[in-house]
Amino acid sequence: MDQSLSDGQVDAYLGRVGLPGAPATDVDGLHRLHTAQLFTIPFENFDVLEGRGVDLEPDAVFDKLVASRRGGYCFELNGLMLRVLRTLGFDARALLARVHLTDPPSGRTHQLNLVRFGSDLWVIDVGFGGGGPRAPLPLREGTTDCGAASFELSRCEPWGWMLRTFESGEWRSSYSFDMGHVTGADIEVGNHYTSTSPKTHFTQLATVSLPTPEGRISLRDREFTEADASGLRTRRIAPGRYLEFLRDTFDIELPELPRTIR
């Protein structure tokens, strides 16, 4: 699932995320890749909501997110990022996390990636949506300020590492992970559950989200939210304007309204 991209695919990916060329294989290059994809390719679940499933075959993910200019969720977004990282020469592997936005937390249903530079490890995650890292995070205990939000990594038994996010004036636990080896089959199991179970919100609610330099824009069914330093603003999107709004705001083209909007 993590086979290398062809030269043509690398060029198409760089064009999709607005980079003029492949960045250096160093920490600065890692930041450039993370920022470019995070602020360009939206987090969204429309295929899951419509019951079409999520195909994690490498070319299917590439065609959807790059060629068709769609978004995706963690297994797609971080799966694509992992292929890009490895193709460009980064020492990278997948990790799986438990989401702590509810109590008790989820199973291991979130994919992120780990990058190694010698003895230094970095967490890179472009697929969590709201509350996800806005930059690569050094894997050590402490806080990283990313402007519109701050992030804290700490050891937290029995979960391993815990990521907490400070946003809108409060800290909250986002997810926990450990260093356990992750196989393609592990990812397939997490993807299958997340994309099919009626117990996950991905199968129940249309969601699309994209960070901005000042905060984030997001759409949950018909409720559009803009978050920045001045606060939160929400408004309802009429069904008749929904597809046009998706295209103009998130650059996503859908053939028909999601089932929860019809």
Image (spheres, rainbow, N blue to C red):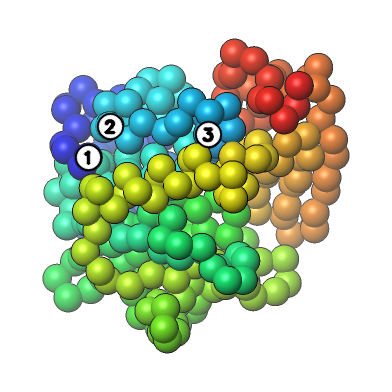
Is residue 16 visible to the viewer in this orientation of the structure? no
Left or right of 238? Residue 175 is left
Circle on res. 96 = none
Query: Horizontal and vertical percent for residue 102?
Result: 62, 66
Residue type for callout 1: Met
Mark 1 neighbour density, 10 Å: few (under 14) some (14–19) many (20 or more): some
Task: Give me the residue at 63% from left, 22% from top.
Answer: 247
Dividing the picture into quadrants, the one containing residue 239 is top right
Precedes in sequence: disc 3 or disc 1: 1
The answer to whether the residue labelled 1 contacts the one labelled 2, judged by CB atoms less than 8 Å apart, is yes
* Mark 1 residue element: loop
Mark carried by residue 57: 2
Please give left or right for residue 49 compared with residue 262 in the image. left
Residue shown at the point (73%, 36%) measured from the top left: 221
Question: Disc 3 residue type?
Answer: Val
Q: Mark number for residue 48?
A: 3
The residue under the point 84% across, 25% down is 238
Q: Is residue 7 visible?
A: yes
Where does the image place residue 24, in percent across and percent down from the top left?
A: 21, 50
The answer to whether 166 appears left or right of 4 in the picture is right
Q: Which mark is residue 1?
A: 1
Q: Look at 26% across and 32% down and name the residue there.
A: 58
The residue mark sitting in front, 3 or 1, is 3
Secondary structure beneath dot 3 equals helix
Could you tell me if the residues under marks 2 and 3 are in contact, i.e. CB atoms within 8 Å?
A: no
Distance between mark 3 and mark 1 Cα atoms:
20 Å
- Considering the image in quadrants, where does the N terminus appear? top left
- Helix, strand or loop at label 2? It is loop
Q: Where is residue 225 in the image (x, y as percent from the top left)?
A: 76, 45
User: Label 1 vs label 2: CA separation?
Assistant: 6 Å
